[in-house]
Amino acid sequence: MANLLPFDIIFDILQGLPVKSLIRFKCVCKSWYDLIGSSDFIKSYHNRSLGTNSNSFLIFTPKHSGKSDLELAQCLWICRIPGRHQFSEDSLGTKLYLPPPFLGDGFFEVVGSCNGLICIRNSFCLALINPSTRMFKFVPYFGRRSTQWYGFGYDSRSDDYKIVAIAGCGFVVYSLGTGLWGGPRCLGKFPSIDEANGFLFNGRLHWTSACRRLLLTFDIHYEEWSGFSLPNCGHGDDLWWVDLGIFDGCLCVIFSIIPSSYPSHVWVMKEYGVKETWTKLFSLPFVKAMPLANTKKRCEVLFSRGFAQGLVLWNTEEKTLTEIEVPIVHFSQVTVCGDSLVPLAHSRLLQGKETKKEKKHHKEEENQMKQDRSKKKQRYMTSVTKLPEGATPSEKTLNLIHEG
């Protein structure tokens, strides 16, 4: 059957199918397997998916307040973006149960989302996940617990995904292509960063400065830092809470005044990098608004509200606000992601809900990882030569001990 249709027609038909179907159809024949796994097909599939909510979904990061919620907080909840004022049963999607070492205290966060991949982390581990294919890959942790900020993005020129980790006045970059961290480099004379995770836009990662007057940017390809001014919103700088997003294809900044009785003000940079093009669009009657996506009605924009307090629809024409019933009662983050076929080399498959046998195996694996880290630290400690009285160990030695 596959040989009866021209290649171009087969290509177009497959491009319109969901990822789950494409994974199954790779078993039809070798030519389909090679086609669906080719870089041209994957890039074309991604480009076709851009701007269509039918191929986009929300990832909720649950939070827990005790042991009773621990199982809930060990997975990612995936929901299709609602076209109406509530999530339908079909849009509720699935739960992705995380592998060890993300099991334990339940703490983890999404660093960022790019081309259908997400980067997640906890206190001592990083991983990349493709929620569509359910494949994941651990990223070797470079061992600096003093790391405060992360960013995740795509270098289109070298076709590579990168993670940026910032600690103090230095930073390092991980390349998915090489599977390695680069050497430490100096951040330069920039003001301290306010936000924990970088926001990806236009091939750059963005962080707001602690003084809330500058937007610091990191070019993913050239791996260079720069920045530009934020708009002047009045009031004292310390009163603002600044969030970043995308609105109508432009970089968006949302200023929230503390306390929460004040509205949030939405600004966009109509020409990227030109500070004179900052334009105020409208205000919203709540703090920490974050634009997520447009619904099928282009005049309606989906926002996350407050400190993970829920979702709302803002009608830009009628200036009305509508609450969205969220299936996840307690969540700490909501991230927009899209269907993707992007592969992860040397990856593993995320499973559904764990069986008792799998839970026991994962617990044993987690305990083994803890023992390995403890043994590694002991080896470093015993390898350190006793120092003369009054001397201090070198920075390299301290780092080796710390990384253990």
Image (cartoon, rainbow, N blue to C red):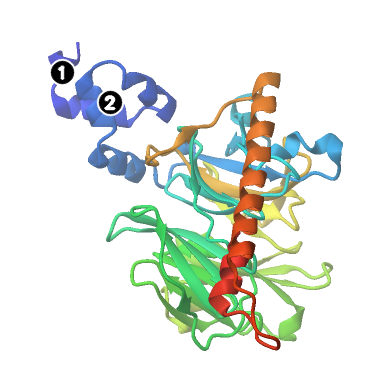
**Residue in the picture at 72% in, 49% down:** 107
Q: In which quarter of the image is the C terminus?
A: bottom right
Residue 72: x and y, percent? 74, 35
- The residue wearing badge 2 is 13
- Pointer 2 and pointer 1: residues touching (CB < 8 Å)? yes
Residue 85: x and y, percent? 67, 38
**Which quarter of the picture shows residue 212?**
bottom right
Query: Would residue 251 appear left or right of 239 to someone viewing this image?
Result: left
Query: Would residue 172 appear left or right of 17 to someone viewing this image?
Result: right
SS category of the residue bearing label 2: helix
**Which quarter of the picture shows residue 207?**
bottom right
- In this rendering, the answer to whether 120 lies above or below 136 is below
**Gap between marks 2 and 1 measured at Cα:** 11 Å
**Marker disc for residue 5:** 1
Q: Badge 1, how many Cα within 10 Å: few under 14, some, many 20+? A: few
The foreground one among 20 and 364 is: 364
Query: Would residue 257 appear left or right of 396 to someone viewing this image?
Result: right
Return the disc, 2 or 1, that comes first in the chain's sequence.
Answer: 1
Q: In which quarter of the image is the N terminus?
A: top left
